[in-house]
Image (tube, helix red, strand yellow):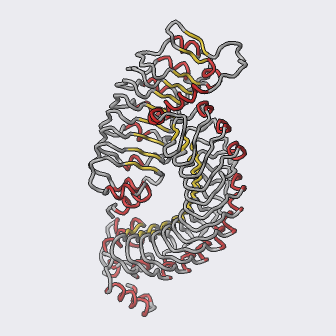
């Protein structure tokens, strides 16, 4: 039909294109006119056929043949193309004719051979998602910065040396990924991207960050790992929504001073930090995870106890020779990693028993304060010879009865904690066969519970009435199922189920949408459903090591929130062990590359 439209040269060029490369099946074009979506991924295309660009303009063939139409084939009711997927081809050039597809909201060109982009891209004013990763782009056309409706821009794995100075005009952009390029600096307008929530700048050559980042008050995740940063601007503390900050593999000598009020996770492993200063530590008022591995830290200061919200502290491979006993007073600390330090004065067997034993040992070294506010001892003996630590209960809001090999928890312990807002319960390393029912007395305050190393065969639905729970540790029991009511725990962030008897991924966990960490290693899980897992949009850590997974579905790579995926020790044959060993990013990328199109 295009020969009737004038512009003879253009239409001939279109026909030439189609004879020299795979053509687009007519059925696909016909379906695209109805659905507004066209998927041409993995078709060996070297350029985009002309009839794709003219899809909104040309009248379909059947209109020329004077045939009668059923209701489903009214070509005059066709939909403009809104979604065009061209990934995993060999396209080297994108024609200016892309402007003819002005209705596009999604354009996917990732995994091609593009070295430049046409300025006409700026005319796609409805575009919301633009995927350009894994190409050979050296620069971006400034016209791209006029795409006012753009929400997501992915440019990782290109050859970009700079970004357009007008980039800050993309005021509706919520996600930007420019990782694995050759960027040495960011444009000063970067702070204009005020809607951003997720920014990935890792694997570049950035030596500094612009102060204008302070204006990005909606960013929750900022990844600046693997750059050349020697310091972090203080203005970052004005990023009020920032929850996760990745600064691994840089050249930092000091912990950044970041009083960002929402910062929960700070990753500064593989830097050159030698000293932890009080001023920097005291800023981290909401920190839950602090990763300091592979630095040169010699001393852990007493001020570490200021981090009352800390749950995980990674000090692996530093130069630490001793630990302050006060470390054991951190009320929420449940993971302390110290491998690869020249520690003296702590026996190796204590270190090898894990966090619980180490903290218990350190607690034994804490000197009792000379004056007691309650006028008595911090501990009292009960008829059952159970030692109740009143200081733990009143000051730390901790109810602990651990490593007693007891079949039940003494009633006196619960009595001593009556009317206290207990936040943490540790009943690990006993012989419990059921969840103590009196835990419900703390349902308005209890946020963390450790019932690991017991003999639980089932988990009572009563635990699901503890609606403030954020963390459940049920490791080393005999569980094979979980109560469906767990999905009522809308604040639950992590659940530890390693060394149990689960034969399948617990159904209820797919429905527990607040989860950030699921540890299910050393069970007998034989399959996982990525389509259901994708609903867990906050899930960042998933440990399925040492299970019975025979098959890893490639769609698992689409669970983009995952930052740590452990699959080693399963009987699957692909992906190969060498790929699994490369780490989560490489594994996820491999899985995505295996998704059938």
Instruction: Judge left or right: residue 123 versus residue 89.
Output: right
Q: Residue 436 location, x and y as percent?
A: 45, 18
Q: Tell me the residue at 52%/45% (across/down).
A: 341
Residue 216: which quarter of the image? bottom right
Q: Residue 101 location, x and y as percent?
A: 48, 75
Q: Residue 215 location, x and y as percent?
A: 70, 58
Q: Tell me the residue at 62%/19% (across/down).
A: 420
Instruction: Judge left or right: residue 189 versus residue 430.
Output: right
Residue 77 seen in this snapshot: no
> Looking at the picture, does residue 374 appear above or below residue 29?
above
Q: Tell me the residue at 37%/38% (across/down).
A: 507
Which of the pair 64/535 is nearer the observer? 535
> Looking at the picture, does residue 484 appear above or below residue 527?
above
How many numbered tags mark residues here?
0
Name the quadrant of the C terminus: bottom left
Q: Residue 118 location, x and y as percent?
A: 53, 80
Q: Residue furthest bottom?
A: 9
């Amino acid at each position: 039909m295009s020969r009737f439209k004038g512009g003879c040269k253009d239409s001939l060029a279109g026909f030439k294109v189609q004879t020299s490369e795979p053509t687009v099946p007519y059925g696909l074009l016909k379906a695209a006119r109805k659905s507004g979506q066209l998927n041409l991924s993995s078709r060996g295309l070297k350029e985009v056929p002309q009839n794709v660009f003219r899809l909104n303009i040309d009248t379909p063939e059947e209109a020329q043949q004077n045939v009668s139409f059923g209701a489903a084939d009214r070509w005059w009711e066709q939909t403009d193309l809104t979604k065009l997927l061209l990934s995993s081809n060999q396209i080297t050039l994108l024609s200016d004719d892309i402007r003819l597809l002005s209705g596009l909201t999604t354009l996917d060109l990732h995994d091609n051979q593009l070295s430049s982009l046409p300025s006409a891209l700026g005319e796609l004013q409805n575009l919301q998602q633009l995927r350009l990763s894994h190409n050979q782009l050296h620069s971006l056309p400034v016209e791209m910065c006029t795409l006012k409706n753009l929400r997501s821009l992915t440019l990782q794995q290109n050859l970009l040396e700079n970004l357009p100075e007008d980039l800050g005009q993309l005021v509706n952009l919520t996600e930007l990924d420019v990782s694995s390029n050759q960027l040495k600096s960011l444009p000063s307008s970067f702070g204009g991207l005020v809607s951003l929530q997720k920014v990935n700048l890792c694997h570049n050559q950035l030596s500094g960050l612009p102060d204008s980042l302070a204006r990005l008050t909606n960013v929750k995740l900022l990844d600046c790992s693997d750059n050349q940063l020697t310091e972090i601007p203080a203005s970052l503390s004005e990023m009020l929504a920032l929850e996760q900050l990745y600064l691994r593999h840089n050249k930092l000598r000091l912990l950044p001073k970041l009083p960002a009020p929402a910062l929960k996770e700070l990753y500064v492993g593989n830097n050159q930090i030698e000293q932890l200063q009080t001023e920097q530590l005291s800023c981290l008022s909401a920190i839950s995870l602090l990763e300091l591995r592979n630095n040169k830290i010699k001393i852990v200061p007493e001020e570490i106890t200021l981090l009352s919200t800390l749950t995980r502290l990674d000090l692996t491979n530093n130069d630490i020779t001793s630990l302050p006993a006060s470390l054991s007073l951190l009320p929420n600390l449940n993971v302390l990693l110290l491998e690869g330090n020249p520690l003296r004065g702590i026996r190796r067997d204590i270190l090898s028993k894990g966090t619980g034993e180490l903290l218990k040992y350190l607690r034994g070294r804490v000197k009792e304060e000379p004056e007691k506010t309650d006028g008595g001892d911090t501990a009292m003996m009960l008829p059952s010879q159970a030692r109740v630590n009143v200081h733990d209960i009143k000051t730390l809001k901790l109810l602990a009865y651990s490593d007693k090999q007891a079949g039940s928890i003494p009633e006196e312990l619960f009595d001593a904690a009556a009317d206290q807002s207990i936040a943490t319960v540790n009943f690990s390393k006993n012989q419990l066969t059921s969840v103590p029912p009196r835990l419900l007395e703390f349902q308005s305050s209890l946020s963390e519970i450790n019932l690991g190393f017991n003999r639980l065969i089932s988990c009572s639905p009563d635990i699901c009435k503890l609606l403030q729970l954020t963390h459940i540790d049920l490791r080393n029991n005999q569980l094979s199922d979980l109560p469906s009511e767990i999905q009522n725990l809308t604040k639950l962030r992590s659940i530890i189920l390693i060394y149990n008897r689960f034969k399948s991924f617990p159904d209820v966990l797919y429905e527990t949408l607040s989860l950030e960490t699921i540890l299910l290693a050393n069970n007998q899980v034989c399959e996982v459903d990525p389509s259901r897992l994708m609903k867990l949009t906050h899930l960042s850590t998933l440990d399925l090591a040492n299970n019975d997974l025979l098959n890893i579905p490639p769609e698992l790579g689409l669970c983009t929130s995952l930052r740590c995926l452990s699959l080693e020790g399963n009987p699957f044959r692909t992906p190969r062990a060498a790929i699994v060993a490369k780490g989560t990013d490489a594994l996820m990328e491999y899985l995505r590359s295996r998704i059938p199109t």
